Amino acid sequence: MELLIIPLVFGVISLILPANWSKLIGGVGAIVSLVTACIHLIRFDPLSQIVLASSSHKMAFGLTFNIGYDAFGLVMVLLTNAIIPIIFLSNWNRDLANNKLFTALVFFMQLGLLGVFTAQDGIIFYIFWEFTLLPIFLLLYWFGAKENNKVLFKFFIYTLVGSLAMLLSLIALGSAAESFAYADLKNVQLTQEVACWIMSGFLLAFAIKIPLFPFHTWQPATYTSSPMAGTMLLSALMLKMALFGMMKWMLPLTYEGISTMKWPIIILGAIGIVYGAIIAIKQNDIKTLFAFASISHLGLIAAGIMLFNIAAWSGAVIQIINHSLISIGLFLAADILEKRTGTRQLSELGGIAKLAPRFGFWFAVTVFAALSIPFSAGFIGEFILIKELFDFHIIIGITAATSLILGAVYMLRSYQLSMFGAPKISAFEDLSWNEMAVFLILSLLILAIGLCSSCIIEFTEPAFRSLTETLSSNQQIIE
Amino acid sequence: MDALIVIFLTGLIGLFIGMLKKPHLNLGVTLLGLIIAFFLQLYHGYYTSPFINYQVLEFEVSGLYFSLLAIGFSILIVLGGYRYFKRDANHTGDYYGLLLFSLCGAIILIGFTDLFMFFLGLEILSIPIYVMVGIKKQDVLSAEASIKYFFTGAFATAILLFGIALLYGATGSFNLNEIRTVIQSGEYQSSYLLIGILFILGAFLFKVGAVPFHFWGPDVYQGSPEIVTAFMATVVKLSALFAFYRFFNGTFQELANFWTGALYFAIALSLLIGYIGALKQSKFKRLLAYSSISNTGYALFVLLSTSNSSLGSLWIFLVGYGCATIALLTLSMAIQNDNDEISAFKGVGFKNPFIGFILIISLLSLAGIPPLTGFFGKFSLLMNAYPQHLYLVILALISSLVGAFLYLRLIVLGLSKESESERVTIGLWHYIVLGICAAGILGAWLIVTI
């Protein structure tokens, strides 16, 4: 329970105390919650299922109060609590760090995310899912680009459409089940047609948030107009809620419909991979470029998740972590470029590597990590995902594999145009200590995960086994 | 029954105290009376009332809950409106008296057992409101609102009376339970009964302000003082909805196939027309009036469900809706928004964090964002209606999407960083009212769910 209470308490404290405390509170709160999560990790046995709060008391309308996590949930909790300190660290020297509203909103965001990852009840999941929308909206509204109301409304309405569809699905599932507790929802037996409808409700919510190909139109503009921390929260953590939701909620609960829904979603994912990459290649705005790159990466993960087997999911979870780390690095680099040169247009940048060699080096490291070179986490993740997609269908596999090549094109292009060539900028201040620290931590983490990815695969394996269990037992009956 | 008498006497005493022209005395007496009434109703049945043999009014558990809510809202309104009523010290007593008499009607409307008492309650509820709507005598809009409300209201009452007469003619009884027995046995003059039911349905839809009888709503809400708007939007709607439920889900239950179609039509249109109409408004009270039409559409879902928990859902929905509406109207008074422009809210929430907080939670609660009371109200109403009325549920979700857009625009306006206006400070009474409303919005759902 303390996992959820700590961000709430620090959020409220930072609202109460005067603004010059908020930097300190941000740092302390983020570290404290990271340490708490680590303690949970040390105590955790991968085979078990931890219950943080549970009430035997049945509330009205089938609501229950159940919070807990399995190995997969714990990985996501750790990821959240590791990313939040990095976000604070990357903001350390900026004006926002001294803003108490900002600090509080990030903590509330963390609360919502942790709630989503630990919910064991459909309605609690929905509550936290919706709750995250509020802090991120205010963050984008107060600290984002001016005159971005239209973009924000688009973002809000898009996500709300998805959420309401998910609510309908939950109501449909819940009215058939004894209560909204996860175990009860999982016990519901559905016919294939109903399962498809319910899955589509969930899918709409998740596809908009990921975003999958035809539902992505809110994303680039939102990323571009948000402050750096907002973009980081959105791409590193909020999108992962949707991937988590697919793995933990959508597929296990409505596995009856998977055989029908598998193909369309995988095809959408594959389209997203190529589509995002191609648009990224032609982008001139570096933040928009990274946004489309993100569509491409996440299309691959979503397609992999729909395979609904343990191997693909192991690849997916590594890729989820990897994408979070990389997107933090990339958006930090983009923001550094924007802050110090006043522009995000690649055509107006150039020759920065000479002016700021340290930035040149660390940006290059991040770019290579994003290219999934061997020894980086992305190599393992993408390799497993692409292999599984190959096994599923060769054309899908080939399409997915193009992401490696196209990724190299847009990433190297963005690096080359901004860092090399004739200098178009007279002065460029090199990295400050906190930015160096962020890049260093990210690279070390990516390297560490790349080298011992088997720990994560083994750690999450029992959880994935129980999540995908239903289908395999079903298959055995058919065989 | 005791609570009713206390409220009535308080109103009467208030009229005489009003002659002293000391507003704070009036406020004290009114509050005291309401609080006594609240506790009498809370401990109803725990003591032997001298009126125990009086059969015309009966309060079951649900009726008690709803009457507590009506009294609670009235307390908030009396407190929140003090600053407004104080301005005209000559008539403070009259205002409070009228409000209390109207509340008497609301409580009769919750506890009635026969058609006669029902009609009396409805009239006692409505007539003081006709006066209160037109209380700003010099204001053209207020006069227009009063006239409009009076004429349409009188017309609706006439229709209702006609319906009651037909009902009596068809079943031979005024008592709701007896009418139900007759309907169950099938020994009635069917066409008279059905026409009577339709007339009663129309009158009810008028009273709660649902489409297609909603046209009075925006004009009347806009013309009346905030405090009367708050009373109409909460107490009146609440008691009318409860009576509606008693009639249609109790007495006319067996004829559900007959009236469900008409109700379907009313709900579907209310859900859409309310929010869509609200999108283009620039006056705050008018916007609230339109959004209240859609909220009525939600509340009417309760009539479609046969489950036992449906009254609980309606109750929690009304708590969320009422607290949010009172909070918003109190805010509008607190920032002295005399012109009733929406743009007056620009930036007030950012300058004063307390106002910002209230603005966010009350609007989000109306929009149905969890974990606020408004969400649980809508959720449970939809949950009860779910398997049988799938398309209506989908429509409700779509409408709440439009609503979310509407409320979000207000939030964005209120939290805007760019504003020339000074930091608004608000009075103690308003702090108390807003605080209670916030507590209701944040935590009231616990009462029902746990």
Image: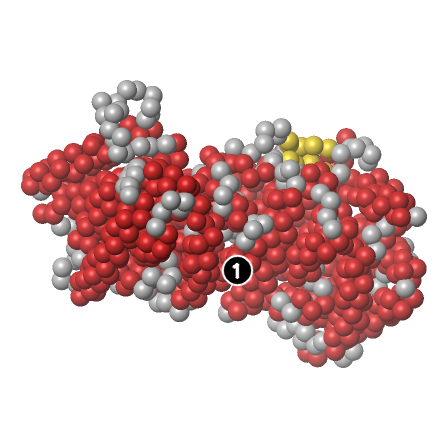
Q: Chain of mark 1?
A: B
Classify residue B99 as left or right of residue A200.
left
Residue A442 position (above or below residue A343): above
Mark 1: which amino acid? Leu
Mark 1, other Cα within 10 Å: few <14 / some 14–19 / many ≥20: some
Classify residue B333 as left or right of residue A297.
left
Residue displayed at 42% across by 65% down: B273
Q: Where residue A5 appears, x then y in whole percent?
A: 59, 36
Q: Quadrant of residue B149?
A: bottom left
Label 1 sits on residue: B395
Residue A296 position (above or below residue B202): below
Q: Nearer the viewer, residue B409 or A170?
A: A170
Q: Where residue B233 appears, x then y in whole percent?
A: 32, 51
Classify residue B159 as left or right of residue A343.
left
**Residue found at the very far left of the displayed protein:** B19
Residue displayed at 67% across by 67% down: A216
